């Protein structure tokens, strides 16, 4: 995977971040962020298709993969999307990009949302895969969503309950969760799946990823509410939203309507896939990313 890309550990804002980066050395920066419970390997079919034009940076979020796992606190603040976003600004500046594009999936797209709010001057445009805004998803939870995204409510239980249960058989949990979220399908290449499972067997990754969700249900929503109170709750840069036609976002939410409450300039559409679009439909994702970013 990632032929011609370089692997590097780069200091973030309180965590050391593992990145794979490559492509056009003097091209515009493009940061790609993964979701749960994956790593930067999820971009292995997309990143090479964009490397002719962009300096493509695929990062492991703090707490995931080979990035460091900071000690948490009672507010889960080390795993807030604010902290994760600050890491990425440091990483991209280290690689020579004070302004850059962001393509992101799942949890990474939630980091991208906060990145665009807290560091608007650094972000040219954002493309997101298969999410609606966190706060609005919680507020609009119904029976169908709770059953489909059961892990949202399981992972936020107090430590160490979910950590202990997941840790008893992390492979079984990972495969059940990821196949369930993708309508029973498994779009993962063997080498990528091997990395996901290997990294997820680490108890520190299991704990950190639970903290990611605990933060999302608490401090992240508090940050969103504070932004709204201060009149700073909308993304200013262009936003492209894509979601799977066979996925939960399509069934349970009006993604475009919800993102128009949270961003000034939104476009988007569904793709004929499930949740893991970058691995199911990499050619389409790469093409849509390129077409969108080239406008800005």
Image (spheres, rainbow, N blue to C red):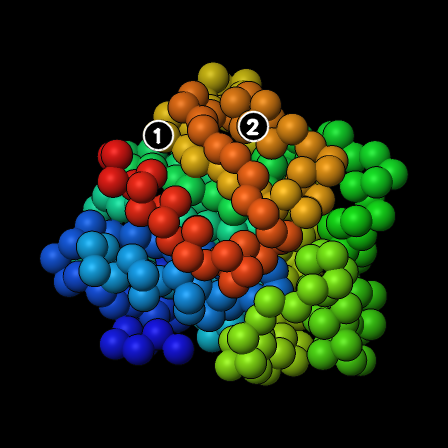
Q: Residue at x 72, y 72 (%)?
A: 175
229 or 182: nearer the viewer? 182
- How would you rate the neighbour count of disc 1 (Cα within 10 Å): few for under 14, some for 14-19, many for 20 or more? some
Query: Residue 23 sits in which quadrant?
Result: bottom left
Look at mark 2 in the image and give the residue it sits on: 256
Q: Position of residue 181 (x, y in %)?
A: 71, 56
Would residue 36 appear left or right of 6 to someone viewing this image? right
- Up the image or down, 29 lies above or below 44; here it is above
Left/right of residue 47 with respect to residue 138 in the rendered view: left
- The residue beneath circle 1 is 237
Give the farthest residue toward the left.
Answer: 26
Under tag 1, what secondary structure?
A: loop
Q: How many marks?
A: 2
Q: Nearer the viewer, mark 1 or mark 2?
A: 2
- The image shows residue 150 at horizontal and vertical percentages of 80, 52
Q: Secondary structure at mark 2?
A: helix
Rendered-image quadrant of the C terminus: top left
């Amino acid at each position: 995977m990632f032929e011609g890309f370089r692997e590097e550990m780069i200091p973030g804002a309180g965590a050391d971040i593992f990145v794979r980066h490559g492509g056009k050395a003097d091209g515009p920066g493009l940061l790609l962020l993964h979701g749960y419970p994956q790593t930067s390997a999820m971009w292995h079919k997309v990143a090479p298709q964009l490397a002719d034009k962009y300096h493509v940076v695929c990062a492991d979020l703090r707490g995931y993969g080979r990035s460091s796992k900071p000690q948490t606190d009672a507010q889960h603040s080390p795993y807030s999307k604010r902290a994760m976003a600050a890491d990425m600004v440091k990483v991209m500046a280290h690689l020579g990009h004070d302004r850059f594009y962001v393509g992101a999936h799942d949890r990474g797209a939630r980091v991208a949302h906060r990145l665009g709010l807290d560091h608007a001057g650094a972000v040219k445009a954002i493309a997101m895969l298969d999410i609606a805004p966190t706060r609005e998803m919680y507020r609009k939870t119904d029976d169908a969503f709770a059953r489909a995204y059961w892990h949202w409510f399981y992972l936020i239980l107090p430590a160490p309950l979910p950590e202990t249960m997941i840790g008893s058989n992390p492979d079984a949990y990972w495969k059940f969760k990821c196949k369930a979220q993708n309508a029973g399908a498994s779009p993962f290449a063997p080498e990528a799946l091997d990395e996901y499972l290997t990294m997820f067997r680490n108890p520190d990754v299991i704990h950190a990823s639970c903290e990611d969700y605990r933060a999302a249900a608490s401090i992240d929503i508090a940050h969103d509410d504070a932004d709204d109170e201060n009149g700073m709750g909308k993304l200013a840069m262009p936003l492209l939203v894509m979601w799977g036609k066979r996925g939960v976002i399509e069934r349970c939410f009006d993604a475009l309507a919800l993102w128009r409450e949270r961003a000034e300039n939104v476009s988007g559409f569904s793709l004929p896939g499930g949740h893991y679009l970058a691995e199911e439909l990499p050619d389409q994702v790469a093409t849509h990313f390129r077409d969108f970013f080239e406008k800005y």
